[in-house]
Image (spheres, rainbow, N blue to C red):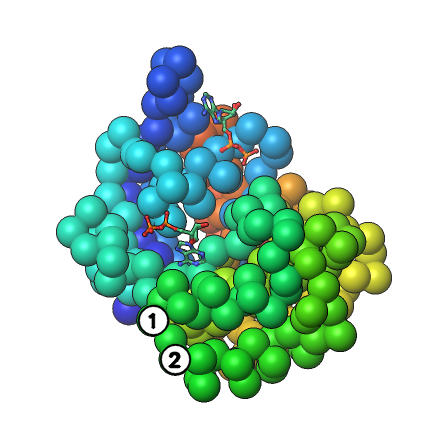
Amino acid sequence: THALSISGLKKQYGNGFEALKGVDLTVEAGDFFALLGPNGAGKSTTIGIVCSLVNKTAGQVSIFGVDIDENFAEAKKHIGVVPQEFNFHVFERVIDIVLNQAGYFGIARSVALPRAEKYLKQLSLWDKRFNQARELSGGMKRRLMIARALIHQPKLLILDEPTAGVDIEIRRSMWEFLQQINAEGTTIILTTHYLEEAEQLCRNIAIIDGGKIVKNTSVKALLQTL
Ligand code: ADP
Ligand code: ADP
């Protein structure tokens, strides 16, 4: 099955701007997939539609075979999303941000706590668990969003520019963590405007520009054409 299947996706914003002009995309289960493109290409719009934060103008999206229009409640169990903007309460503690997300998915505290510990440790945030989110650095906040997105153990993790503004050392440790999560079976889709990031991490890649997919290939094949 496909982890994600998008067809004929169009988005026209309220001001008339056409951000997506018919996007078709499929991502296989288990893949580590990059959506690469310059600023303004339509990456965040695509991600926003997949997680139902943005309304689409036309087209279809399904997640592990579940159409988001037919059953978003079911589809969203399968996805964890790491948006670009920090969207947690800065006065909340790290551990509460992660556990509250578990509560949101109906996960018992006895199950959520060891999971939170595992991910926060792997992301070097366990020592910060009793700190308020506002006390974290930008890179730590980004990692907190990753831990939160994984707490319900989604089959598909979607990250919008996860390493934007993160320094190179932290970026490398985030890459390692994501590779490990993918090796454990989670499908990963990330958006990026760094070719290097796609090259280092991903197996398959789609290049988006001006709201259209201009290339969709394996990273290996892409590198051979450069
Ligand atoms: P990317 O994530 O690739 O940088 P976005 O999906 O954020 O691209 O944006 C695609 C295009 O849509 C950009 O030109 C952006 O300015 C425009 N856009 C994004 N959000 C809105 C909005 N709410 N209203 C109008 N235009 C928007
Ligand atoms: P409600 O279902 O109560 O309307 P929303 O779906 O708008 O709530 O989401 C509430 C919060 O949870 C938002 O901050 C959103 O970003 C986050 N969220 C929703 N679905 C997911 C998900 N699958 N993974 C990670 N965060 C999610």
Q: Is residue 108 left or right of residue 58?
A: right
Per the image, the residue denoted by label 1 is 106
In which quadrant of the rendered view does residue 213 lie? top left
The numbered mark at residue 108 is: 2
Q: Residue at x 82, y 56 (%)?
A: 168
Q: Residue at x 16, y 51 (%)?
A: 70
Amino acid type, residue under disc 2 in the picture: Ala
Q: Do the numbered discs 2 and 1 sit on residues whose CB atoms are within 8 Å?
A: no
Residue projecting furthest to the top: 15
The numbered mark at residue 205 is: none
Distance in Å between CA atoms under marks 2 and 1: 6 Å
The secondary structure type at the circle numbered 2 is loop
The secondary structure type at the circle numbered 1 is loop
Amino acid type, residue under disc 1 in the picture: Gly
From this view, report whether residue 191 is shown above or below residue 199: above
From this view, report whether residue 118 is shown above or below residue 149: below
Q: Is residue 58 left or right of residue 114?
A: left
